[in-house]
Amino acid sequence: MRAMVLDQFGGRLQLKEVPDPAPPGPGQVLVRVRACGLCYTDVKIASASLPGPLLPRLPHILGHEPAGEVVAVGEGVMSVAPGDHVALHIYLPCGRCRACWAGDETLCDSVRQLGFNLPGAMAEYVVVPEINAVRIGQHVPLEEAAIIADAVATTVHGLRERAGLRVGETVLVIGAGGLGLHAIQVARLGGARVLAVDQAPDKLELARKVGADDAFLIQSEHAAKQVLAAAGGPVDLVVELVAKPVTMSLAAAVLRTGGRLLMIGYQPGVDVAIPTPDVVLRNLSIIGSTASSLLSFRESVRLVEQGKIRPVVTDRYRLEEANEALERLKRGGILGRAVLLVA
Ligand SMILES: [Zn+2]
Ligand SMILES: [Zn+2]
């Protein structure tokens, strides 16, 4: 099969002919990848700027936002059949560690992840366990189904499972990019008033289009005032997708007493400060959230099928154009999500 292969960190991906995956064993599903979303984490992996344990051994196939068609199923597979369209949950927790026993599968000590420590989906085929291949209605374009894996499910998981979003709250989303545009939709769907900030004017427009009540430029010295005015006071929940000092100060300035700061974005090597009196004397909660549980992923698939969340795909490339797509992503030139179409 054809695949885009990373041979050395910092180098370009190479289009290569690699062996097809083995036929699906019992409980496994062979999927013909039709679309694979691109994430800034792909840039971090390719340039080796992720923490060591998350880096793959080379050569490696990137790609952790896949959707496609089932080609073959192994013995005992019941929930999908050849021809079905599937979105793929990319996390394979071990089931044998304390986090897994406790139901905290996103914290599994030895989780395996497509595109991280397993071969990813910038390739024509992948094999996954049956529970990772979730059937999705054929009315959903596969390029939209693809980005459920991370851009949609990570925000659904964070807002629903980690931050406990409640009807009637006011939410500020910091960073209206690949994840933020979906966080806005999830917050709105959950009954919140939603504001957004970003550094790019064209992202503000898109943020309003997908459901933000208002959106502002982050670099404005008035950003906090604008948010407070638009929210009618301090906000209940900040969804932080940027993780820079300036965005953390903004979060601290607009959160209400008892408010929650949900951190999904992170930057290796960047430490941020938050005023300790704010956290202690105002009872702020700082909540980290990584990945998505299988439950949040499945809920995300249903929400997309029902048209309640619309995956925001703004750029399309062919598989062999992955380097150009990653370059553009690195330069901040992608408004929503970019997707590789795998013919
Ligand atoms: Zn990602
Ligand atoms: Zn585990």
Image (tube, helix red, strand yellow):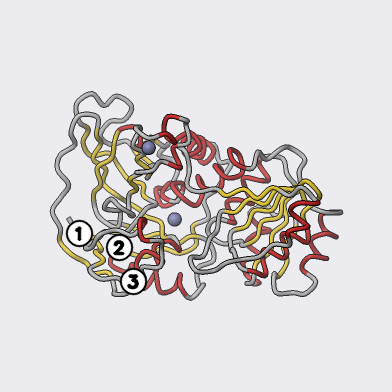
Horizontal relation, residue 161 to residue 218: left or right? left
Q: Residue at x 44, y 60 (%)?
A: 39
Residue 58 is situated, as x and y percent measured from the top left of the image, at 23, 63
- The quarter of the displayed image where residue 9 is located: bottom left
- Ligand 2 in which quarter: top left
Residue 275 is situated, as x and y percent measured from the top left of the image, at 73, 62
Q: Nearer the viewer, residue 153 or 279?
A: 279
Reply above or below: 56 against 310. Answer: below
Query: Which residue is under mark 2?
Result: 319
Q: Quadrant of the C terminus?
A: bottom left
The first of marks 3 and 1 along the sequence is 1
| Marks 3,1: beta carbons within 8 A | no
The three-letter amino acid code for the residue at tag 3 is: Asn
Q: Nearer the viewer, residue 316 or 41?
A: 41
Q: Nearer the viewer, residue 16 or 321?
A: 16
Q: CA distance from mark 3 to mark 2?
A: 9 Å
Residue 71 is situated, as x and y percent measured from the top left of the image, at 23, 39
Q: CA distance from mark 1 to mark 2?
A: 9 Å
Query: Which residue is under mark 3?
Result: 323
Residue 183 is situated, as x and y percent measured from the top left of the image, at 60, 50
Q: Residue at x 76, y 43 (%)?
A: 169
| Marks 1,2: beta carbons within 8 A | yes
The three-letter amino acid code for the residue at tag 2 is: Leu
Mark identifier at residue 126: none
Query: Which residue is under mark 1?
Result: 2
